[in-house]
Amino acid sequence: MTRPSGRAPDALRHVVLEPGVARHAEGSCRIRMGNTEVLCTASVESRVPPFLRGSGQGWVTAEYGMLPRATHTRGDREAARGKQSGRTQEIQRLIGRSLRAVTDLKAMGEMSITLDCDVLTADGGTRCASITGAWVALHLAFRHCLKMNVIAHMPLKDQVAGVSCGLWQGEPVLDLDYDEDSKAQADANFVLTGNGGLVEVQGTAEGEPFSEAQLMSLLKLARHGTDQLFRQQRAAVGIG
């Protein structure tokens, strides 16, 4: 079995995390996974949604979008159409859930952080790259809040990262690019925490169903991949 990219079955694409790339955002990170590139920015506001007012609890949420030429052909701006697609809404909710899973919202006090994840170039795995890069941006935003004495201690309880896995020519492989994703017999997105917790698993077969044993082999690959991503996240924010 030979992958289109020539990578080994358990190999990630080349990953680069660039922290602090947006001048005005409290936290930011540009993540590259192969040819997929996403700009993640974290914006801090001293207010919370109406349902949290008076609760003493903060909120972390996300918005996701793709630039018109992030793909091979130009896509319309969703703002110009006047509404977001179902795919966009599903992905940004996933990003928000993933980040809240590792955040102590009570430790934030009544403040909100919005993670904007804008896809500059898409070549598969944009939602997973967004989650991984958004964690770096969120960490840096909280660090800014600590420096400004807005919060007393770091609200992040753990790391979170996302990676895709799939069955290519019947074999489990890690981190699908577009060529693989578009032809895989099955593909799954795994969102995992640094302590080994599962935040979300999204898996789909194309054609023949896949087995529980195959799912577990994909999960094993995902843990291998996210372990590497966690190391790069820590390096990006300067922690051991």
Image: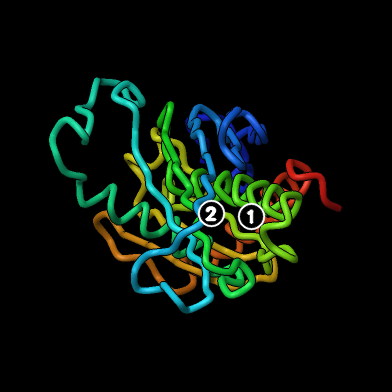
Residue 185: x percent and y percent?
A: 34, 51
Q: Is residue 90 left or right of residue 130?
A: left
Q: Mark 2 touching mark 1, by CB under 8 A?
A: yes
Q: What is the distance, in whole Å, between disc 2 and disc 1 at their CAs?
A: 7 Å
Which residue is depicted at the point 48% across and 64% down? 59
Which is more toward the observer, 141 or 11? Answer: 141
Amino acid type, residue under disc 2 in the picture: Gly
Residue at (48, 32) in percent of width and height: 36
Apparent side of residue 172 relative to residue 224 in the rendered image (left or right) = left
Q: Quadrant of residue 223?
A: bottom right
In the drawing, does residue 75 fall left or right of residue 163? Answer: left
**Viewer-nearest residue: 239 or 75:** 239
* Residue closest to the eye, 182 or 114: 114
Does residue 37 appear in this view?
yes
Q: Residue furthest right?
A: 240
Helix, strand or loop at mark 2: strand
Q: Which residue is mark 1?
A: 226
Residue 15 figure quarter:
top right
Instruction: Judge whether residue 218 can be spotted in this image.
Output: no
Q: How many marks?
A: 2
Dot label at residue 162: 2
Q: Residue 64 location, x and y as percent?
A: 37, 44
Nearest to the observer: residue 37 or residue 153: 153
Give the left or right position of residue 100, taking residue 108 as reference. left
Residue 76 image position (x, y, % from top left):
19, 27
Whichever of callouts 2 and 1 sits on the residue coming sooner in the sequence is: 2
Q: Where is 160 relative to 84, above or below? A: below
- Circle 1 residues within 10 Å: few <14, some 14–19, many ≥20: many
Up/down of 227 relative to 168, above or below: below
Is residue 164 positioned above or below 215 on the image? above
Assign a secondary structure to mark 1: helix
Rendering coords of residue 79 (x, y %): 21, 34
